[in-house]
Amino acid sequence: AEPSRVWRAVAQVPGRIVFVSPRFSAGMLFDEGALLVKIDPTDYELAVARLEAAMAETRARIDELAVEKEHHAASLRIEKASLALAEASLQRKQGARDKGVVTPDEVDREARDVLRQQQNIQALENALGLIPFRLKTLEATLAAHAANIEQANLDLARTHIKAPFDCRLAQTQIEQGQFVNKGQTMF
């Protein structure tokens, strides 16, 4: 008699065998979905937890970036209002200088204040201009973490080796406590 289907159980992840079915021996029958072997899932559970923490951190950085954008926008409004006042003051002092009431040095100090305000505005506009690029970087990092979590969850699921269909074990090549490498035939 020949089996209609043959399945070779190959370890898809490395690890120590922490569970072997009590009936795990050649000739034993198993129903589809029966847990045959379990590889220690601890490393894979930790990987998922680390990646979830990294995702949470990236989400927090995205939220922080949104707040930073709001703060820069508010500061920009204030700096623009301050610039308008400084420019008005400069015009008054220039008029007073033309009448001989103030010295040219006072006008120069006022002009420096206007330039300082313009520089502050430029710095804030530059910071606001970089935020979309920083956001794209964080979103890409978030997508990479999501993909890595999917892979880690897949690896975690691969620590439970179940019968893919009703079957009979022909040979067993592992035992509880043994370390298996990825690609190693187990049974």
Image: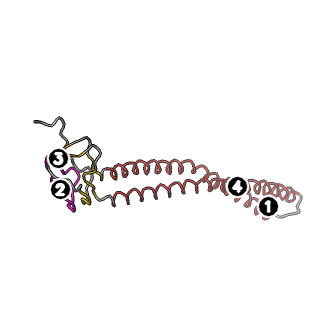
Instruction: Measure the alpha-carbon separation of dots 4 and 1.
Output: 29 Å
Q: Is residue 175 left or right of residue 145?
A: left
The image quadrant of residue 175 is bottom left
Q: Amino acid at mark 2?
A: Ile
Instruction: Tell me which numbered mark, 4 or 1, is placed earlier along the sequence.
Output: 4
Q: Is residue 79 left or right of residue 143?
A: right
List the residue tagged with mark 4.
Answer: 74
Q: Is residue 159 left or right of residue 28?
A: right
Instruction: Tell me which numbered mark, 3 or 2, is placed earlier along the sequence.
Output: 3
In-front residue for pair 115/176:
176
Instruction: Measure the alpha-carbon separation of dots 1 and 3.
Output: 95 Å
Above or below — where is 77 with respect to 109?
above
List the residue tagged with mark 3.
Answer: 169
**Element under label 2?**
loop
The mark found on residue 107 in the picture is 1
Q: In the rendered image, which quarter contains the N terminus? A: top left
**Element under label 1?**
helix
Instruction: Tell me which numbered mark, 4 or 3, is placed earlier along the sequence.
Output: 4
List the residue tagged with mark 2.
Answer: 174
